[in-house]
Image: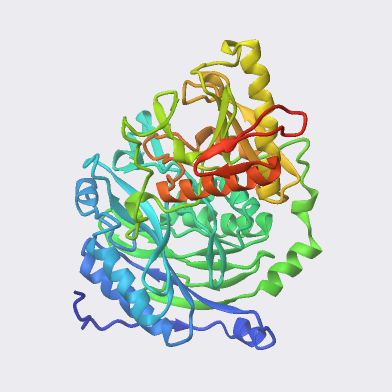
Amino acid sequence: MMRNWPMKLITTFSRLYSTRQASKTMTDGQRIAVCQMTSVEDKAKNLEVVASLIQDAAKEDVQMLFFPEACDYLCANKKDAVCLAEPIIGGATIACYKQLAAQHNVWLSMGGVHEKDPSDPSKAYNTHVIIDNKGEIVQTYRKLHLFDVEIPEKNLRLKESDIAHAGGHIVTPVETPVGRVGLSICYDLRFPELSTALSILKAEILTYPSAFTQPTGKAHWHILLRARAIENQCYVIAAAQSGTHNEKRRSYGHALCVDPWGTVLADCEEVSPCYKIVEISQQKLKEVRTNMPVFRHRRREVYSLYTLSLRKELLPAHNSNPPASASAPPPSSNEPGYTFGHVKVPETCVFYKSDLTYAFVNLRCVIPGHVLVAPIRMAERNKDLTEEEAQDFYKSIRIVQALMEKVHSADSCTVTMQDGRNAGQTVKHLHCHIMPRKKGDFIENDLIYLELAKHDQFKPGHPAKPARTREDMEAEAQYLRTELEKMNNMTYIDGNRTAEKFGDTGSAAAV
C-alpha cells in the first residue's frame, strides 16, 4: 500500500499562456505535462514528489505526464545505485506508479528507472516505462547508449557500463492518447540514427527523459533537442532532473517541449519540482510535414537506415498479464507428426502433404500467414534433395503460395529459404518460408528479411517472437485444410483424404 504524502511541496504551476490561447482554436489538441524534479537517494521522498505532480497536473485535464531519467532515485555511490534497483514486475516503486496512473486517470512516461537484473546482481538496466490510465504497463525501453569515457592521462573514468547493461532493441512507437510516442533516454539524444528510425516507424513524439550535467546541458541541451525535433518533424518532450542531488551530482534542468518546427513551447528552467503544460497538436504536425516534406525527399536508392533490432511486444519480464499459454507444448513422442530438424511438427499443425513434401503453420510468425514448406525426408540443404524431391518441393511451394495469397487476399508473397547456417538457418532441415505480403506491412519493404533473421533467435536481451498457442496453430491449420480442399476440389470424409489434380502442378492433399 502507498503511504500518505504529508510532505509540503511548493509546486510551480508555470502555465504557457501563449500555447493555451492558441489551443482555443484547435480541436485536436491533447494536453501533456513535462515534469522536472531533483531526485535524491531516498525513494520515498522522490515518490512524494512524483505523486504530487501527478495529482496537481491531473486536475488540469492533462492526459499524459512525462518524468525524467532516475525519477525513482539518484545515488552518489555506484554500489547503492545497483542495490536499490527493483524489478519492473513486483517492484514497489513501479507498483506505486501504476496505482497513481489509475487513480488519476492519466498516462505516465516514467523515464529511466533502475531495473534489477536477476541474472546479474552487479548491474541494472536503465528502463523507460509507459503506463496507461488503467495502471497497466503498455511498453518498456531499455537505454541503448551508455555513457562511457575513460582518459587515463586525465585520471578520468566515467563509465555507465560499470553499473548498467545496455538495452538490445529499438521499440516501436507507442500508441497513446496524445500521439505515437518514441522512447529514448538521455544520452540516446546524441545518436540521430535512433530518432530517425523512430520517425520512420511513424513516431509523432520523441521523448528524452534526462539527467544532463551542468556543463553538457549548457553546451548542447537546447541545440540537440531542437535539432531532433526539426530533422524528424516530431514533437520532442524532454523531462529533466535539476539542481543538486548529492555532493557529487548536479543536473542542468530546463525540461523542454519543442514543436515539430523547432519552437520551444515549454522550458522549466531550473525550478524544481515543477511541470509545464503543453498542447500536442496533430494539426501542427500535419502542417509542418506537408509544407516541408523531407521524408518524401529522402534518397532511399542512395542511402538507407535499417533497423536491425526492433521490438513491438513487451518483454516477458515486464508483462504482468502473459498469455495463458506462452508457447505451444511439444508433441509427445507417441503423437503423430513429422520430424523437422531437432523438433517434431504435430500432424494437427500440418495442412498440406504430397508424397515427398509437407506444409505446416508456424510457431513464431513474422507476419500473419507465415507458413513453412519442407521435404518429408530430413534433408539439411537444398543440394541434399534428390531430383524427384526437388521437383516436388518446388511444386508444393507454388501450391502453398497460391493458397496463402488467396486466404489473405494478397497479390504478392515473399518466398525465401535460408540455406545454411550463414544464411540464417536455425533448424537443420531445409524449409521455405511463405509470407503473403500487403502494401505497407513494413515501413521499408526489405525489412521483412531482417525480421525473418531474428524472429526465432533466443539471445540475451533479444527475445524471439512470442510463441503461439497450440490451439491457435491447430485452428489455423484446420482452416487452411478446408480452403485447400476448396481450391483443389477435394473431398474429405471421416478423416480420410482423396486427392485430385491441382491444375497442372501435381497432386496435393489436405491431410
Q: Is residue 393 left or right of residue 99?
A: right
Regarding residue 308, the answer to whether it shows in the image is no
- Quadrant the C terminus occupies: top right
Q: Is residue 102 left or right of residue 508?
A: left
Residue 420 position within the rendered picture, expressed as x and y whole percent measured from the top left: 54, 18
Residue at 23%, 48% in the rendered image? 82
Residue at 59%, 52% in the rendered image? 198
Residue 270: which quarter of the image?
Answer: bottom left
Residue 65 in the image: above or below residue 152: below
Q: How is the image coloured?
A: rainbow
In front of the other: 78 or 308: 308
Regarding residue 319, the answer to whether it shows in the image is yes
Residue 299 in the image: above or below residue 88: above
Residue 451 in the image: above or below residue 248: above
Residue 498: which quarter of the image?
Answer: top right
Residue 242 position within the rendered picture, expressed as x and y whole percent measured from the top left: 38, 65
Residue 460 position within the rendered picture, expressed as x and y whole percent measured from the top left: 36, 36
Residue 366 in the image: above or below residue 249: above
